[in-house]
Image (tube, rainbow, N blue to C red):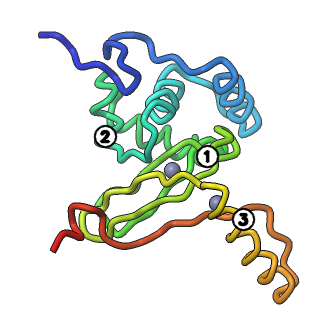
Amino acid sequence: MPRRADALGRPADATPALAPALHDAVTLRLERAGQRRTPARTAVCAVLAGAGRPLTIPEILDLDPDLAQSSVYRNLVVLEQAGIVHRIVTNAEFARFELTEDLTGHHHHHLICTRCGAVEDAPAVDAVEQAVHRAIAEVERAAGFKTTGHRIDLVGLCRVCGEP
Ligand SMILES: [Zn+2]
Ligand SMILES: [Zn+2]
């Protein structure tokens, strides 16, 4: 039986590959956290890098059937502690995971559906970022707070769940 292709379109039995710069950054962060880079940890990162949206553990297992459920869970904990993976908590059954923004350099916001639990990435377009930064500057002045970044999760109903 032919195996499914992974998120990057490679056959699922191909060794998951990370872009070289990402590979080096992941190795460095694991070392700093006192952890080793293992094939399973690299594979989890490769699945997340190829997805383009935050994934649940069942989705990660679907995209790389060579991964074992128990090790994916443990490896996500390690990757999160090493600053490689960001966990997005919703009120759905499963948390979702993505590579951290400072690792990928890809700043974006999230659209979280409170009914079906879907989470989509929303591009941080210039007009939105400029408006956000103006609002942040006011909060900083009022609160005496020095901001180093922001995370925006928009919560509501997705296109499917919001249909009348
Ligand atoms: Zn995201
Ligand atoms: Zn933003």
Q: For the image shown, how many numbered marks are present on the structure?
A: 3
Farthest residue in the bottom direction?
Answer: 142
What is the x, y in percent for residue 103? 67, 39
| C-alpha span from label 2 to label 3 | 34 Å
Q: Mark 2 points at which residue?
A: 59
Dot 2 alpha-carbon crowd within 10 angstroms: few under 14, some 14 to 19, many 20 or more = some
Badge 1 element? loop
Q: What residue type is labelled 1?
A: Thr
- The answer to whether residue 37 is left or right of residue 94 is right
Q: Which amino acid does label 3 sit on?
A: Gln
Mark 3 vs 1, N-terminal side: 1
What is the x, y in percent for residue 29? 72, 35
Hey, which quadrant is residue 138 in on the image? bottom right
Q: Residue placed at 88% from the left, 83% from the top?
A: 144
Tag 1 and tag 2, C-beta contact below 8 Å = no
What is the x, y in percent for residue 58? 29, 42
Q: Is mark 3 within 8 Å of ligand 2?
A: no
Q: Mark 1 points at which residue?
A: 100
Badge 3 element? helix
What is the x, y in percent for residue 92? 30, 64
Dot 3 alpha-carbon crowd within 10 angstroms: few under 14, some 14 to 19, many 20 or more = few
Q: Residue placed at 15% from the left, 74% from the top?
A: 164
